[in-house]
């Protein structure tokens, strides 16, 4: 509640409305109630000049500063969202390709399959379980642990996402501390992943991250049922 009140009192729109209400109150008093009072003329002229100047300043700020800033923020947020969705889809293609080379015959890289696997339930159904090296998520893990094109493409896309997050953190006014901390931590995780080298332990770390994103899984909350990164982008 305190943070909400603080945001209200720091809002330019709030003080514009307060100024406008005072100006309307002043005008109504001038024409309806106080026209016969001796002191009113001087008070009215001084107050109306001050309030008129304030309203003009607010209008100037709104047109010159607020609207361009809001438009820039909207473009940055839309670009961030699209960048993340593009990276997520590209990594999914590499997961499918690596799984195919790892022995899976039930996955195809067609648009229908990709759209299905981009959903929480679809990905979980396709990669949950499996007790053989060429089933479930293991076909993917065994293939990317060797390095190769799919591993390199995944790392490249993680690097792209990390740079995008860094740009947003430095240029977008994220006012929610929890959301800001989330993206700061995510940038650190991605930086750690992109600097890793092929191998079983490193691949397990990468697979755990993929599971959290595509399956909507958290070791603390369990299965969320949604993509936490996409949700956080909507919250900024």
Image (spheres, rainbow, N blue to C red):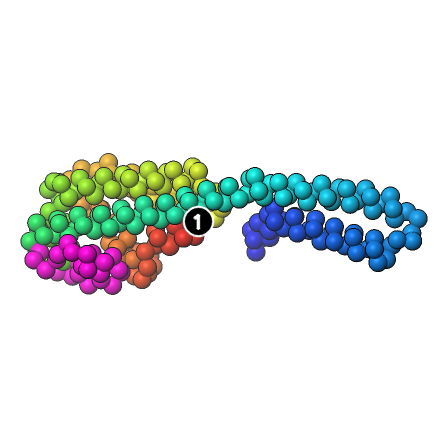
- Asked which quadrant contains residue 106, the reply is bottom left
Give the residue drawn at x 78%, y 53%.
Answer: 27
Q: In which quarter of the image is residue 147?
A: top left
Count of residue discs: 1
Label 1's element? Answer: loop
Q: What stretch is highlighted in magenta?
A: 104-133
Q: Nearer the viewer, residue 6 or 64?
A: 64
Q: Position of residue 58 (x, y in %)?
A: 64, 43
Q: Tell me: 73 left or right of 112.
A: right
Q: In this view, does 77 lie to the left or right of 84?
A: right
Can residue 153 be seen in this snapshot?
A: yes
Q: Measured along the vertical axis of the image, is residue 228 above or below residue 56?
A: below
According to the picture, the residue beneath numbered tag 1 turns out to be 236
Indicate left or right for 210 with 187 as reference: left
Q: Is residue 188 visible?
A: no
Q: Sort mark 1 into few (<14), some (14-19) or many (20+) by Cα contacts within 10 Å.
A: some
Q: Is residue 154 magenta?
A: no
């Amino acid at each position: 509640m305190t943070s909400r009140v603080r945001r209200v009192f720091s809002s330019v729109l709030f003080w514009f409305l307060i100024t406008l209400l005072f100006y309307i109150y002043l005008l109504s008093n001038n024409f309806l109630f106080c026209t016969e009072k001796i002191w009113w003329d001087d008070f009215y002229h001084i107050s109306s000049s001050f309030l008129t100047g304030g309203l003009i300043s607010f209008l100037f700020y709104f047109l010159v500063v607020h609207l361009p800033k809001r438009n820039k923020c909207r473009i940055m947020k839309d670009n961030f969202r699209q960048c993340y969705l593009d990276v997520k889809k590209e990594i999914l293609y590499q997961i499918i390709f690596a799984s195919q080379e790892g022995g899976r015959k039930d996955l195809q890289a067609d648009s229908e399959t990709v759209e299905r696997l981009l959903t929480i339930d679809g990905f979980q159904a396709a990669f949950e379980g499996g007790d053989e090296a060429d089933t479930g998520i293991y076909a993917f893990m065994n293939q990317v642990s060797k390095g190769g094109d799919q591993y390199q493409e995944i790392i490249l896309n993680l690097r792209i996402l990390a740079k995008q997050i860094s740009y947003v953190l430095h240029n977008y006014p994220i006012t929610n501390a929890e959301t800001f901390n989330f993206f700061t931590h995510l940038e650190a995780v991605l930086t750690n992943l992109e600097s890793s080298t092929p191998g079983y332990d490193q691949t397990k770390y990468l697979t755990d991250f993929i599971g959290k994103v595509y399956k909507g899984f958290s070791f603390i909350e369990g299965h969320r049922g949604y993509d936490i990164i996409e949700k956080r982008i909507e919250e900024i």
